[in-house]
Amino acid sequence: MIDTDNNNEAAAAELREENKRLSAELESLKKENEALRSGRAKLETMLESIGEGVIAVGCDLAVIFANNAAAAICGFDGGAVTGRPVSDALRLINAASREPAPNPVEKTLQTRQTVGLEHNSIIVTPAGEEKFLSASSAPIFDGGGALSGAILVFRDISDRRKMEEELLKVSKLESLGVLAGGIAHDFNNLLTGITGNISYAKFIIDDESPAQEALNTAEEIAFKAKDLTAQFRTFSKGGAPVKKIVFLSETLRPAVEFALRGTKVRASYDIEAALWPAEIDEGQISQLIANIAINAAQAMPDGGRLFVRASNETAAPGNHMNLSAGKYLRISFRDEGHGIHPENIAKIFDPYFSTRRAGDGLGLTASYSIARKHGGIITVESTHGRGAIFSLLLPALPEAGAPSCLSPGPAISAAGKGRKILVMDDESIVREVTANLLKHLGYEVRTVKNGSEAIAAYMEAGKDLKPFDAMILDLFVPGDLGGPEVVKTLAGAGEKVKAIAASGFSNETIMAKYRDYGFCAVVSKPYKIKELDELLQSVIEK
């Protein structure tokens, strides 16, 4: 009996000890579980605080966790994707082929390695928005070293990608500008030789000869080619307007007709009789007009009418177009095309925006830039399905008077007799034809091929007391001094030079701000002999 009591007492004691041990273990498990919950909460809080998107998946590719940044980037409800396939949360496609792209976590679970996102992969959100990501997937292992899942960390780099693409486009355009500048320079030198020899032929052929009409036509076509090369300035760095007083009443119609040549569109005109003149870069404004006319023709592929109206307008202070108060020319272009969607109106002048598959989106952007550089503006109005109206406003110069056809300038004569001119150009054909034309007008001409020779010739003439009355200097001479360096050197030596800057093309600001470089005037190649003669007389008489 005593032994039984002892055994029961021992068993009870042992049970009490076991209960204490189990209670201690349970308490320990509770603390560990609380620590795990606390650690997970801290981890989730930390993951929610970072800007990158984070998605954790199990070995079955089901989402275990997704932070708020991931939900914002991918466009899903964070709680709704838990337990669902990761492909539901992160839909990846190849930007070029539009085919599904592999998710990095799939490869991570196969290889147990860190894997990046494949090149050119993008996500498509439930709303249809496409985004470029920078992403990396890494494996998750448990305490025993077994693979338990993968974690994907990513960020939206769409803005950076767009910026890189824009910088690449700008770089390409700058390269195009360099190429265009070189082509235009060489081409205009050749045109100078052609137009100069045509002008010289007109001098030595009898006025009644039937050849005069053919020469006039050839000269007109050659100067149309000059207008085309002038457009290259828009693609070059700078592109500052080289302005002169122009009567758009004379040049508007030819510019539109040239742009519409070969299309089914016909233009009609309403040009105010006393249209004010404007100080503009004729080549750039011709390009602007051509761009708008071409845009209208593209909106009417089956043909239609383009209504062109030009009138004088006065802008009051505080006008809604934010233009300086003053006198303006308004030129409007109304087409009968399909019009512009309301959502596209605000984007119509944006770089690279085009609703046409073959369009580059640069024509109207260039036109807007040209208008702004001239102190003007372009506006557009459209009702979809009822055509569009583009309106150009340019500062006018009413005080400049009437067109030259109503008030003719001085005729070409022997006004150059007794005047001594120095011509510097690296192209022999330009030197030769310019000299022939000036000599025909009575000028005494000395030609040189570079700046070093120009300085020597100028100083020598001064010593002989037979100074040059004026100089025509090419801006750029490969391997030697150009016009600006010649003027600077002579001015530094105390000489008061009268120099005209001549160039077939300039992608800098010298032609637009020639006085800052010591020049009295500028002339663009190819130049008309009457223009050159009047310019020389004006410079010499100052």
Image: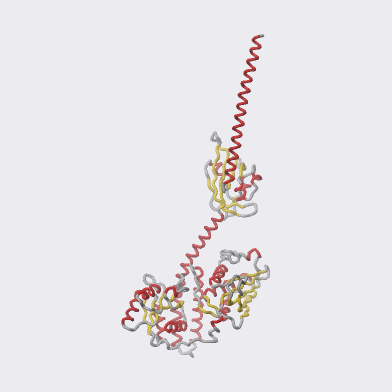
Residue 294 in view: no
Task: Give coordinates of residue 445: x percent, y percent.
Answer: 38, 83
Q: Nearer the viewer, residue 403 or 97?
A: 403
Q: Position of residue 481 (x, y in %)?
A: 37, 72
Measuring 60% from the left and 83% from the top, which residue is drawn there?
273
Q: Identify the image quadrant of the C terminus.
A: bottom left
Q: How many marks?
A: 0
The picture places residue 182, in percent across and down from the top left corner, at: 45, 70
In the displayed image of the protein, which residue is found farthest to the top? 1
Query: Which one is nearer the viewer's eye here, 359 or 388?
Result: 388
Quadrant of residue 17 in the image? top right
| Quarter of the image that includes the N terminus | top right
55 left or right, relative to 489: right
Of residue 102 and residue 383, the one placed in the foreground of this image is 383
Does the image show residue 326?
Answer: yes
Q: Percent x, y for residue 172?
A: 49, 63
* Placement of 476 over or under 406, stated as above or below: above
Which of the pair 124/93 is nearer the observer? 124
The answer to which image quadrant residue 251 occupies is: bottom right
Colour option used: secondary structure
Above or below: residue 159 compared with residue 267? above
